[in-house]
Amino acid sequence: MSSTPTQTATSSAICVENLSHQYPAPKRSRRGNSQPAPRVLALDGVSFEVNMGEVFGILGPNGGGKSTLFRILSTMLRPSVGEGRSAGSANVMGYDAVAEPGLVRRQLGVVFQSPSLDGKLTAVENLRHQGRLYGLGGFELSKRIDHWLEYFGLSDRQDEFVERFSGGMRRRLEVAKALLHEPTLLLMDEPATGLDPAARRDLWQKLFELRDQKGMTIALTTHLMDEADRCDRLAIICEGKLVAVDTPGNLKARIGGDVVTVEPEVAENGSGAERLASEITEKFGPWDEGASPAVVDGRVRFEKADGARVVAEVAAAYPGKIRSLTVGRPTIEDVFLRLTGAALGESNA
C-alpha cells in the first residue's frame, strides 16, 4: 500500500538544491558503438530559492542551461547524471518535482516559449478546451473564462479565431490559459520573445498586477536584458553553472563605477581594438579586479569610478584613432559580462 504524498512546509515557492543534469552528446560526436556515449553537462550543481510573491528571473544565453532548468521545474524532464553523482532536487510549492510531478502540476501555470494555442479555434474555445483538461466545466468554467478574458483585455475579441490575433494578444491569451485552473505559481519560458516593445510593456504590466493584486509568484527564463532588469530578483546561469543570485540593483552595484566603451577607427590589419585596449590598460591604470580594458564585439570596454573624466582624457590621448566614446551606469549586460567574461550571445554551452 503506497503512502499519500505530503506537502512539505516551506516559505519558498521553488527550492532547487545542487541540481544537475546531463544529456547524451550528439551522435556525430561519438567515436564508436563500443565506447560509452559521452554526456554533456547542462546543469552543474545549481542551487537557489524563489520567494513567495516575487517575480524571479533566470537569465542566461541560449544553450546556457536555463531551458533545461525550466523543463525540470515544469516536470517535463527528470534530472539525470552519471553514476556516482547526485542529480540534486527541485521542490515546487512544497512538492518534489521528480517524485510528485502530478501534485506539482496542480500548483503550476506554464507558459511555453513556443505557442500552444490552436489558431483555428476562438479565444473562448482555446480556454474551454484547457479548462476541460483540468476537469473544469459548466458555470464555473464559463465564469473563469469570462474573468481572464476581461482581465487581459480580450473580451471583445473572444469569438475571433486566434490566428487573427497579434503577437501580444496571443501571449496574453497564453497567460490566461495558464491561469485558468488558478495555480499558485506561474512559470514562463522566454515570455517576451517575438513581442514588439509596446506588447512587451503591456505584458509586464499584467505580470506586475498578478504579483501585486493576486499574490502570484512568477518565475521566468529570459535572455533579454531589459526583461531581466524588471525582475524582483535574478539568477544568472552560464554554461550550466549559477554565477549569481540577487536583485538587479545589487548586481549592478557590484561593478561600482561607470562603464566606458570605446569604438576605435578600424586599422588596416583589423587589430585596432586590441592595440587600443593594451595602450589604455597601461596609460590609465591601476585597475580594479575585472575592470580593465577588454575587447567586446570590436569595441574596448572598461570600468572606472569617474567615467566622464576618463572619457575626456582618452579622447585627448588618441586623436584620430577613436570613432566613438560612450559612458554610462552599469547595466545587467555589464554584470553578465563581468561575471562570465563573455557577452550574452557568446556562451559555449
Image (spheres, rainbow, N blue to C red):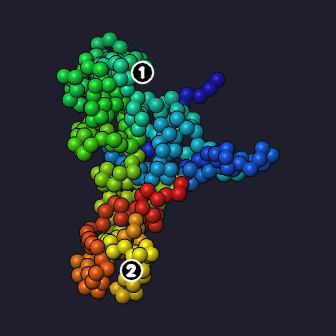
Q: How many marks?
A: 2
Above or below — where is 70 with respect to 44?
above
Q: Position of residue 6 (x, y in %)?
A: 51, 33
For the point 56% across and 54% down, which residue is it? 44
Q: Position of residue 13 (x, y in %)?
A: 41, 43
Q: Residue furthest right?
A: 34
Indicate which label's residue lies in the foreground, 2 or 1.
2
User: What amino acid type is highlighted by mark number 2?
Assistant: Leu
Which image quarter holds the N terminus?
top right
**Quadrant of the image occupied by residue 136:** top left
Q: Position of residue 149 (x, y in %)?
A: 25, 25
Q: Which mark is residue 134?
A: 1
For the point 25% across and 17% down, which residue is it? 159
* Label 1 crowd (10 A; few <14 / some 14-19 / many >=20): few
Label 2: state its secondary structure.
helix
> With 9 as the anchor, is 3 left or right in this view?
right
* Label 2 crowd (10 A; few <14 / some 14-19 / many >=20): many
Q: Badge 2 is on which residue?
A: 276
Above or below — where is 154 with respect to 33?
above
For the point 35% across and 43% down, which residue is it? 193
Q: Residue furthest top?
A: 138
Q: Is residue 329 visible from the viewing direction of this image?
A: yes
Above or below — where is 286 with respect to 106?
below
